Amino acid sequence: MRLTKSTDIALRLAMRLAVTGDEKDAPTTREVAGAVGVPYTHAAKVVSRLQHLGVVEARRGRGGGLALTAAGRTGSVGQLVRELEGTGDVVGCEGDSPCPLRGACRLRGALRAAQEAFYAALDPITIEDLVARPTGPLLLTLGIGPPT
């Protein structure tokens, strides 16, 4: 299974925010985008989605910035990926030119089971788990730090 670019960016942003210091050092969307190597416009869309899901808190203005919520830190990565990816099938059996096998196909069910196994493998993992050593310290070197 392949994740969408948006989900990849969301996971990277969440991981980077998980190792951010206290509230006064909250990075901006532009800073986090630069640190994880994604375009600002993409990061802004992803931050909006993560905020809607309750994973990220975004504060505007002076002293503002991004912070990972408690739910973002300890929630299931599998559930987050499900939310970001949606519930669609791995293959498109319907549409403009539907598959002629759709009425008796066993592949669709097998792929759906494989997709669920993929998510199930991510279910016990949290963002906190993903940023444990050695990843967390490495994330801290990616361009966002306290003001000097």
Image (cartoon, rainbow, N blue to C red):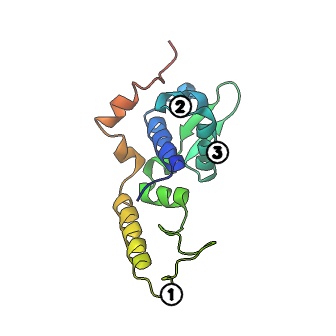
Residue where numbered disc 1 is placed: 103
- Please name the amino acid that badge 3 sits on: Ser
Tell me if residue 84 comes above or below residue 135 in the rendering.
Answer: below
Q: How dense is the environment of label 3, judged by Cα within 10 Å: few (below 14), some, or many (20 and up)?
A: some
Name the one closer to the observer, 103 or 81. 103
Which residue is located at x 62 percent, y 47 percent? 51
Tell me if residue 46 comes above or below residue 140 in the rendering.
Answer: below
Image marks 1 and 2: residues in contact by CB distance under 8 Å: no
Q: What element carries label 2?
A: helix
Mark nearer the N terminus (1 vs 3): 3
Give the number of the disc on residue 32.
2
Gap in Å between the C-alphas at discs 1 and 2? Answer: 47 Å
Instruction: Specify whether 64 is left or right of 71.
Output: right
Quarter assignment of residue 59: top right
Q: Position of residue 48 (x, y in %)?
A: 64, 45
Which residue is located at x 53 percent, y 34 percent? 38
- Please name the amino acid that badge 2 sits on: Val
Image quadrant occupied by the N terminus: bottom left
Quarter assignment of residue 15: top left
Mark nearer the N terminus (1 vs 2): 2
- Furthest residue toward bottom: 104
Gap in Å between the C-alphas at discs 1 and 3? Answer: 39 Å
- Please name the amino acid that badge 1 sits on: Gly
Q: What element carries label 3?
A: helix
Residue where numbered disc 3 is placed: 48
